[in-house]
Image: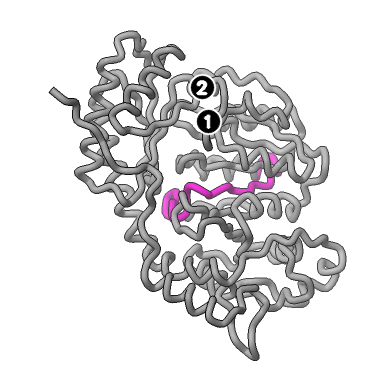
Amino acid sequence: MAQTRFTKSFTQQAPIPDAAMDAAMAVMRTGRLHRYNTLGDELSETMLLEREYAEWQGAPYCLAVASGGQAMQIALRAAGVAPGDPVLTNSFTLAPVPGAIAAIGGQAVLVEITPDLVLDLEDLERKASQSGARHVLLSHMRGHLCDMERLAELADRLSLTVIEDCAHTMGASWNGRKSGNFGLAGCFSTQTYKHINSGEGGLLTSDDAEFMARATMLSGSYMMYARHGAGPASEVYDQIRLETPNMSARMDNLRAAILRPQLRELEANIDAWNARHDLIARMLTRCTAIRVPARPSVERYVGSSIQFRLPGITPETARSFVAGLAERGVEIKWFGAAEPVGFTSDHHSWRYVAPQKLPATDAILSGLFDMRLPLTFSLEDCALLGELIVEAADSVASVEVTP
């Protein structure tokens, strides 16, 4: 008898809303795609996006930029990270995070993670002391938030400046406080696989006027810094405008026009993602071979992907597990692979970062698997995915289940 097979694409995102397509066409009809190309007292789409996102995020300032990676690079430079400075960051993240540190000449100091895929705060404190680092680029990798109140207390005690990579946590919160509002800055992505989709794009938020003035100049505002929807007062730029280099990383009006209507749908989409995530998580949790990361009750997450572990699995069996699911149409990624594949890599393949011993992280990643959950999947689709993963995990006879 033929085995059940999943037939939908894991990279097919939901269509861009009609309102966003209409807004994009309106911008293209004007020909004025550059954010500063306006007529009279016209407010550009990018300016309006900054204003609306700042209000949605609950932050005084917002800057729209070309990508989430650019948001991180600009934030690090605006925060005062100089070439050669150590910057603490997660050992489990995607390459643009250590890449942002390397791009400005910083030295990434990798911090261990816990089995729940969040930053190990004890290791953070230890490595802050050992390295002398004054900055943390905190990656909420795959949407998992560490204890943000404890992190904020630790950062305050150690005089650490925190910049949050919120590429996977737009709309998430800890105890009612939004991700991105715990440190000096929050960096968000609008790349296709994130929570609002403009192909590429980024947003940077802060409550610090001087920081945001530096960031705005770095983004390439020239002397048009007053033409931002959620920027500091013009007098803040008095010296900053002459001291800060231009990195030319602006967002354009076309992408901003596509994003604004999506922002209005984000809360409903978060609920839809979480319904899909939670359905699969409940199914996986019932399998004795599988470990699903714990989610504290004070965490509101955005379940646009799901992660699970098969502790003790060998590399050979992990490859077989991934291949077997692929044969049934299920695309999962394994973070324990020796070589990077697609978007997936680990710290061993970041050769622009000094090699570091991370035994806890390596043990966790050796059995860690990851799966996208686009909103094109129905709840029935997700139930089938859960069944197929559990069936595959149960059939892996060599998995050694550990606490």
Q: Is residue 172 highlighted in magenta?
A: yes
Which quadrant: the N terminus?
top left
Q: Amino acid at mark 2?
A: Ala
Whole-percent x, y for residue 83 in the image: 82, 42
Q: Which residues are magenta?
A: 156-176
Asked whether disc 1 touches disc 2, contact meaning CB atoms under 8 Å apart, the reply is yes
Q: Position of residue 245 (x, y in %)?
A: 82, 60
Residue at horizontal 61 percent and vertical 59 percent from the top: 204
**In the displayed structure image, the side of residue 89 where residue 8 appears, left or right:** left
How far is disc 1 from disc 2 in space, using C-alphas?
A: 8 Å
Q: Can you tell which of label 1 and label 2 is closer to the viewer?
A: 1
* Viewer-nearest residue: 266 or 239: 266
Residue 93 lies in quadrant: top right
Residue 91 shows in the view: yes
Query: Which residue is the site of mark 1?
Result: 341
Circle 2 is placed at which residue position?
337
Q: Residues within 10 Å of mark 2 (few under 14, many from 20)?
A: some
Q: Quadrant of residue 383?
A: top left
SS for callout 1 = loop
